[in-house]
Amino acid sequence: MQLPRRIKINLLIGFFVTVVIAVFMTIQFSPMETLEDKFYDYRFKIRGAIKIPENIVIAAIDEKSIGKFGRWPWSRDKLARLVEKLTKDAAEIIVFDVIFSEDEKYDRILARAIRQAGNVILPIVFEFDRKSTVPDSEFLLNAAFKSIVNPEKFNHYSPIITKRALIPVPEMIKETIALGHINMFPESDGTLRWEAMAVEYNEFLYPSTDLMTAATYLGIPHERIILMATEGIQLGEKRYIPTDKHGRTLIHYYGPTQTFKHLSIADILDGMIKPEHIQGKIVLIGATAVGIYDLRVTPFSPAMPGIEKHANVISSILENRFLRRADLSTNLVILLATGFLFSLLMTRLRAAGASMMTGVFLLLIFGAGYYLFIKQGFWMNIAYPSNNILLIFIGVTAYNYAVEERFAKKIRTMFSSYVTERVVNELIKNPGMARLGGERREVTVLFSDVRGFTSFSEKHTPEEVVGILNEYLGAMTDVIFRWEGTLDKFVGDAIVAFWGAPMRQKNHAELAMRCALNMAKRLEELQQGWRSEGKFVLDSGIGINTGEVLVGNVGAEGKKMDYTVIGDHVNLGARVESLTRHYNTHILTTEFTLNKIKDLITARNIGHVSFKGIERVQVKGKENFVEIYEVRSIQSGLQSEIQGCEEKETISNAEE
């Protein structure tokens, strides 16, 4: 089946836009990626905070603690007292988010407290600015992943590579039960969305502190933390942490700042915290005070303490809550499927329906993205498909608007000289009413011609002839437009009009008849004016007929076209008008028109009119006889009447 040109172009626009957006997705077009990141962040905000596990607390280096113990950093004997207090209160694991890479006079005291606790995890920090010149210690090498599956895959998608490691001083590093890095890598907009589960240093891969804390709490030995290159991390038998190809995992944030319980170190050391708030829990020691500047931008908060990020990651590992991002192929399938389907549906809809369909598709895309994120922990890309839908809608709408504007201009140009402005506007709103090609349709035609015009024009100057003729034609045109007729043409002093096209008019015969009566009355008014002015008085005859004709554009394509009617019934109308001279009357109509309005006449709904059968005539070129009726307005108060033609009354071969 041959599709219309407009539908073809609409489909082409939709498919083209979809393919372009697919290319942008493939190359990771930066503005769109940034928008998708923001959509991702809003999914967290819409979801809101969720319940946190009870086995993690934060020992906070907060404003209260700084106010009591002085500005940070504190001497390490104070931190030793903190470790001893937490050990006394039976903390399960103590995790420092504090670097001890430089010697200090109280290192031995803190190292002894760490040894006595037997459950302290210390951090490593990797740097990028300059390469380390110090040989790696045995303790650092022991902290690296011991089991890596398919390490060759990292040749194509390497983890984050660093040049220098800051590790705890020797006294402390040998007392810790585990080491892990605490590096954080915000994205280009400064937001922290990913946790680097593995960082490369000197060709070894090192786990994060969060991973080591969770593994230690679960009792999983170091050798059973298996790094599946470019895929994920197998943590014992029951947990699998999905990662991207660079060894990163999405951070599952539980809520905004202070979602996790904060315990001021000042309160802990003063004995104001009950032991049950610490017993059996993972205690994370880190800074929350604003002045220490360990604040991060997250999807939930513009300033979340880094220690809270650790709490979120550790909790998600312990609770097996992980987020997965859809891969490129999945996102491309979603983009292409929604784009192509939307393009197909758009071709069947007008502006209002297309707007509603756009809204529906956007709701489906955003709704699916939110649902999958909340219920399945699945990050589906919504920026590309949603913008694709909007661009298709804009492109198709703009094209259709341009086409409709051209079509409207064509209709306005075509019909503004034929019909009233109201009819033109209606045709523009509903272009289906007017087929610009030819079609068969029942119409009523009206022919009017000035009598004795040739004689008048020979006796008067051209200026006088044109002046009075324009006055007459202008008045008659106003009447035709008043009765919603289509002005076909002026042929010298003759007028051709019709009803029933381009707009379909069920009462076309009634409108034409009322117009003819109005034209006769208006002519009487003009004649009175001309007599009073001493001018020549014009007179005219009107012929009306109803029947099926061919209506459409006729002429030379691209040069001169007229919207007109053609056919036997048009010719009959012209010949009936010519008979007005023969019968010396102003209005004649055929039986075909009379039959269309007979019920109106009987019901007295067409004024005070007399229809008198004149003759049964056989016009030139026709075999069948046609009844001709004289139409006159009668005195107000008299009943409209119809007098039929007698069978014996016939005239053969009536002239045009």
Image: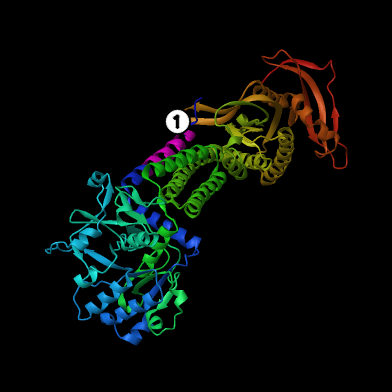
Whether residue 234 appears in this view of the structure is yes
Residue 102 located left or right of residue 341: left
Q: Nearer the viewer, residue 410 or 25?
A: 25
Q: Residue at x 23, y 68 (%)?
A: 173
Instruction: List x then y, in percent, for residue 130.
Output: 15, 63
Whether residue 73 appears in this view of the structure is no
- Outermost residue on the front side: it is 116
Q: Nearer the viewer, residue 436 or 81?
A: 81
Q: Main secondary structure of the magenta part?
A: helix
Which stretch appears magenta? 6-21
User: As displayed, is residue 265 above or below residue 641?
Assistant: below
Residue 419 sits in which quadrant? top right
Residue 270 located left or right of residue 178: right
Magenta span has 130? no
Instruction: List x then y, in percent, for residue 37.
Output: 38, 56
Name the quadrant of the C terminus.
top right
Report which residue position mark 1 lands on.
Answer: 558
Instruction: List x then y, in percent, for residue 529.
Output: 69, 45
Q: 10 Å neighbourhood of mark 1: few (<14), some, or many (≥20)?
A: few
Q: Which amino acid does label 1 sit on?
A: Gly
Residue 72 sits in which quadrant? bottom left
- Outermost residue on the left side: it is 133
User: As displayed, is residue 594 above or below residue 126?
Assistant: above
Q: Which of 521 and 512 is in front in this view?
A: 512
- The mark tally for this picture is 1
Callout 1: helix, strand or loop? loop
Residue 534 located left or right of residue 612: left
Magenta span has 17? yes
Instruction: List x then y, in percent, for residue 651.
Output: 76, 16
Residue 538 sits in which quadrant? top right
- Outermost residue on the right side: it is 638
